[in-house]
Image (spheres, rainbow, N blue to C red):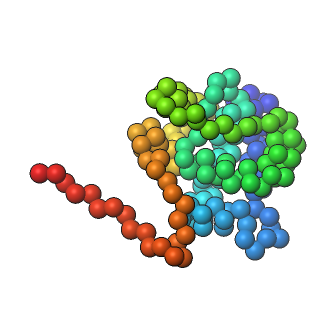
Amino acid sequence: MTENQKLLWSKIQDIELDDIDSDFNFTNRLARENGWTTEFSLRAIEEYKKFIFLICISEQLLTPSDQVDQVWHLHLLYTYSYWVDMCKETLNRDIHHGPTKGGQQEKDKYQNFYSDTKKLYQVVFNEICPEDIWPSSEIRFGEINFTRVNRHRNWIFPKIKIKKR
């Protein structure tokens, strides 16, 4: 990293998403809404910060993992934290979130962006992305059939895989 990049990375790491005066903070909400542990949520937040850093230093378009994207979606709901604290005061630029338009061409494009993101991650951070937060492209783009479910009214059981004979 250049000296400017090191300074930017330090500033991004210092962004605090949790309001210490809140009984139900960002990390708690992220964990609850995704069925994650607090520890996993904290790791996902760290990976989100790495992704934001990569966006800032890259000339190419990048795509997050679904886990990182969940952090990003929630952060966007905290509008002051996202647009003022992070974009305006920390990054000095706006970072917009754009969804796919659908179709095979878009799928191919985003798979390429995702692959490029993971390669850049390895170069910049000198480590491989954690697989549980940055899964393979097959998993990232194959497991996209999500539905919001109220876990107080519904039980959730994983599907049993049946081997074909």
49 sits left or right of 128 in the view? right
Q: Where is residue 25 shown, x and y percent of the image?
A: 73, 66
Q: Which quarter of the rendered picture does the N terminus lie within?
A: top right
158 sits left or right of 67 in the view? left
Q: Where is residue 55 shown, x and y percent of the image?
A: 68, 33
- Which quarter of the figure has residue 43? bottom right
- Which quarter of the figure has residue 23? bottom right
Q: Residue, x 79% and y 48% (percent of image)?
A: 82
Q: Residue, x 64% and y 24% (percent of image)?
A: 60
- Which quarter of the figure has residue 137? top left
71 vs 159: above or below: above
147 vs 98: above or below: below
72 vs 36: above or below: above
Q: Residue, x 49% and y 54% (percent of image)?
A: 146
**Observer-nearest residue: 66 or 58?**
66
**Observer-nearest residue: 44 or 62?**
62
Q: Residue, x 60% and y 47% (percent of image)?
A: 68
4 sits left or right of 123 in the view? right
Q: Where is residue 65 shown, x and y percent of the image?
A: 54, 43
